[in-house]
Amino acid sequence: MHDTQESQSRGILIVIEGLDRSGKSSQCQKLHDHLVGNGGQARYVKFPDRTTPTGKMINSYLTGSVEQDDHSIHLLFSANRWEAIKGIGRDISNGINVIIDRYSFSGAVYSAAKGNPELSLDWAWYPEIGLLKPDLLLFLDISPEEAAKRGNYGDERYETEKMQARVRTLFKELFARIDDLDVWLVDAGRAIDVVSQDIFAAIAKVSSDGPLTESLGKLGPLLSSTTT
Ligand code: Z5A
Ligand code: MG
């Protein structure tokens, strides 16, 4: 775990990913409170950040009030991360642990899951290359059927069981194609506090030795046939 007593050390970059309603936002908030409660500094960042100009365009698309070309909306989601990344890097350097709710991994798989033949997973990943690589990626795994039982499911674009099933498969393919990425699969179908305990245990094992200089790189080859 990042030693919050050493003012010299940097923060850690944690990403929480998962399907819709897998409990990402609940767990990000709990992790934030846990780190702060233990005397550390933490910041909770959520993508898409719907407050910025790009985020407002994304929100209009997600809520169905405007249509967008698949490539165009994809690049807007990516731009929404690029415009925030310097600030995140600065916080990490200043010893603040940054918890990110959805990141490049959601960015690539949701677009690729649309099934547009001109928007492959490889194409979708490309704009993410160069963004900061997380120290730890937690994937909250839940079946689309289980997720659908939770509140408000179905209000936004992409919130269908068919889409979520494709997304789940693509997440696993994507993780298998990224070198040297610390991914923890967490069974998110359990009670909230049980899931949190697993997450806190994973965080305790992360080291913040050395500067956070690593960036997301190109995807490796697909070694198994898990595509949709
Ligand atoms: N998207 C994209 O296409 N490209 C991108 O680059 C990015 C995103 C970043 C909006 O995302 C959409 O944008 C999303 C992907 C796409 N589309 N879909 N689908 P978002 O992050 O703004 O919204 P969301 O993640 O889809 O939904 P959510 O509401 O934020 O879900 P969540 O954060 O995973 O769950 P939650 O809010 O913590 O919990 C949901 C409910 O379940 C709530 O009532 C909780 O009290 C309950 N809950 C949570 N955990 C549990 C457990 N363990 N047991 C029982 N009940 C629980
Ligand atoms: Mg959420």
Image (cartoon, rainbow, N blue to C red):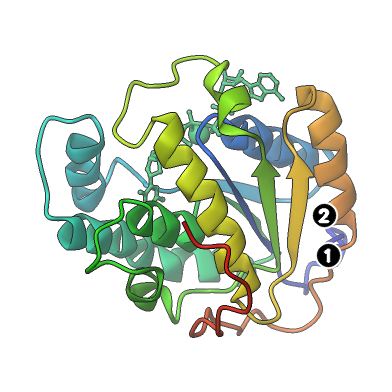
Above or below, 87 relative to 39 = below
Q: Give the side of residue 133 with respect to residue 123, left or right.
A: right
**Residue in view at x 29 percent, y 41 percent:** 51
Residue 49 lies, in percent from the top left, at: 36, 46
Q: Which residue is mark 1?
A: 206
**Residue in view at x 66 percent, y 35 percent:** 142
Q: Which residue is mark 2?
A: 203
CA–CA distance in space, label 1 to label 2: 5 Å
**Which residue appears farthest toward the front when viewing the image?**
225
**Residue in view at x 60 percent, y 83 percent:** 214
Using a 10 Å C-alpha cutoff, classify the residue at mark 2 as few (fewer than 14 neighbours), some (14 to 19) or many (20 or more): many
Q: Are marks 1 and 2 in contact (CB under 8 Å)?
A: yes
Residue 19 lies, in percent from the top left, at: 54, 40
Q: Give the side of residue 40 with respect to residue 52, left or right.
A: right
Residue 36 lies, in percent from the top left, at: 75, 41
Query: Of helix, strand and loop, which one carries label 1?
Result: loop
Disc 1 Cβ-to-ligand 1 distance below 8 Å: no
Instruction: Give the quarter of the image for residue 56.
Output: top left
Residue 45 visible from this viewpoint: no
Above or below, 120 relative to 100 = below
Using a 10 Å C-alpha cutoff, classify the residue at mark 1 as few (fewer than 14 neighbours), some (14 to 19) or many (20 or more): some
Q: Give the side of residue 201 with respect to residue 55, left or right.
A: right
Residue 122 visible from this viewpoint: yes
Q: Which mark is residue 15?
A: none
Q: Look at label 1 and name its amino acid.
A: Val
Instruction: Give the quarter of the image for residue 149.
Output: top right
Quarter containing the N terminus: bottom right
Above or below, 48 relative to 118 = above
Q: Look at label 2 and name its amino acid.
A: Ile
Residue 207 lies, in percent from the top left, at: 84, 70
